[in-house]
Amino acid sequence: MRTLPDSRSRSRLWLVASLVALLALVAAACGDDEAETSDAPAEPAAAEPSDSEEAPELETTEAPDEPEPDEPATTEAPEPETTEAPDEPDPVETEEPAAPSGEPVRIGILFSNSGPAGVFGPPTANIAEFIEEDINAAGGINGRPVETFLADDATDPAVGRQAMEQLIDGHNVDVVLGTHSSATRQAAKPLAEDADVLYIYAALYEGGECSSVMFNTGEVPSQQLAPVIPWMMEQTGGQRWFLLGNDYVWPRRSFELARQYIEAAGGEVVGEEYVPLGTQDFSSVAQIIAGSGADLIFPALVGGDAIAFETQAVDFGIGQDAIPRLANIYEENVLGAMGPAVTAGMRVTLGYFKEVDSALNSEFVSRYFEHFGADAPPHMTFSSHIYDAALLYAAAANTAGTTDTAAVAAAMEGLSLTTPTGDIAITGSRHLAQPIYVAEIQADGSQAIVQSFPSVEPDETCDPA
């Protein structure tokens, strides 16, 4: 680019020089006395400096040209900064969901807030607040806010059926999340089926449930017991089991399967007893256990019944110190009511403890106690499963783009999430693959997770078609 201007400059200079020389010759021919002056080499000298003029011309041309490489750099350097500066907030703005609006999606929660299992209720009622808050903060369900409706079954299946009816007919809920006894589930399920309302049963139970409107996200025996019973026998050296439970479907079916796991591990069942829900006097049962020769006890007692048995067992010489326990429903609120003098050393197998070691869970538990107070009833397996069930439902309904029961059920199949519980996934049996934890109760009453089994598949089948 700089070569072309230099050639034209030289041509113009030599043309001027030639014209000057021609004029000088004409003047000489005319005999003009002043031609001598013109003959002076001043003119050629004026032409010769044309070479010296080339240099400034080159400098003049090159001087502005030299910064040309720098100019793009000067322009480009700030441009990324100007572009990037406003771009940095864009991801945050994109991820910020719009506030939900319109008619709310109604989530019913059927739970035990009174009766023998009433001790499980307060954490679940607390978590209902987080269900609303967290789903709405994420944009709601299909852009609509969620609203929760709580109904207490009073640990009574007849009351539970009435509570389910109130949720469906009175509150017109889109889904029911349940954490209550299997007896209540059996009484309430037909109402959900008749109304075609999705029913997610989120409590640990005996397994075997299958319905077109149901999913079951609680622990089942093939998860809670199959991997843990052999581990317990290895840890304690015990082989002779006594099974004690409330007299209804969950303990009975659980013990039927537990017997298989015990015998497969080389142990034996030396006694099996059942008591009605609400039993407070365990003296006769305690005497039977004391004379059985058992060196391990598997109690499947609910809430207040568990508290009554364990506090009385010490007086009959069959406390934890004498015969180790493996419990599958002794969560932190029940254990706290028993007291550390009774519970120290017990092992409990569940799908969640607040001590789960993950950043997500630690943040969630901290938030729970900051919101509800340091003395709030601890977040535990039942409240954790209700929270997970709500997140699963919201994810499925958003995927389906509707709250229609059949569409949401189809979207639930194979759905997986990571929650404070851990990694969870709906299986083809409409049950939940989930982690199982074993906690040992410490001398001060705290829980320490001593064993974990990640992503345990439920040994269940279901074909609701």
Image (cartoon, grey):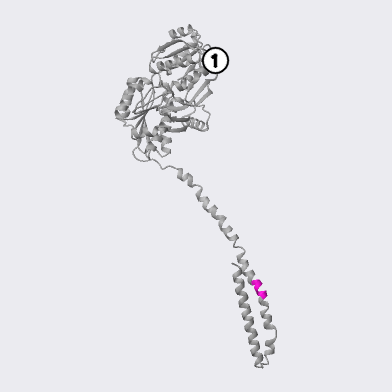
The answer to whether residue 346 is visible is no
Residue 137, picture quadrant: top left
In the image, residue 273 sits, relative to residue 44, either above or below, namely: above
Residue 290 image offset from top left, x and y in percent = 48, 7
Q: Check disc 1 and report its element: helix, strand or loop.
A: helix
Residue 171, picture quadrant: top left
In the image, residue 434 sits, relative to residue 244, either above or below, namely: below
Task: Name the residue beneath numbered marker 1.
Answer: 236
Residue 463 image offset from top left, x and y in percent = 36, 27
Which residue sits at x=59%, y=62%?
68
The answer to whether residue 462 is visible is yes
- 212 relative position to 46: left or right: left
Residue situated in front as seen by the camera: 424 or 152:
424
For badge 1, the amino acid type reads Thr
Residue 271 image offset from top left, x and y in percent = 45, 9
Write down the region rendered in magenta.
51-56
Where does the C terminus fall, quadrant-wise? top left
Which residue sits at x=65%, y=87%?
24
Is residue 189 rendered magenta in the image?
no
Q: Determine crowd level at label 1: few under 14, some 14-19, many 20+ residues with C-alpha closer than 10 A.
A: few
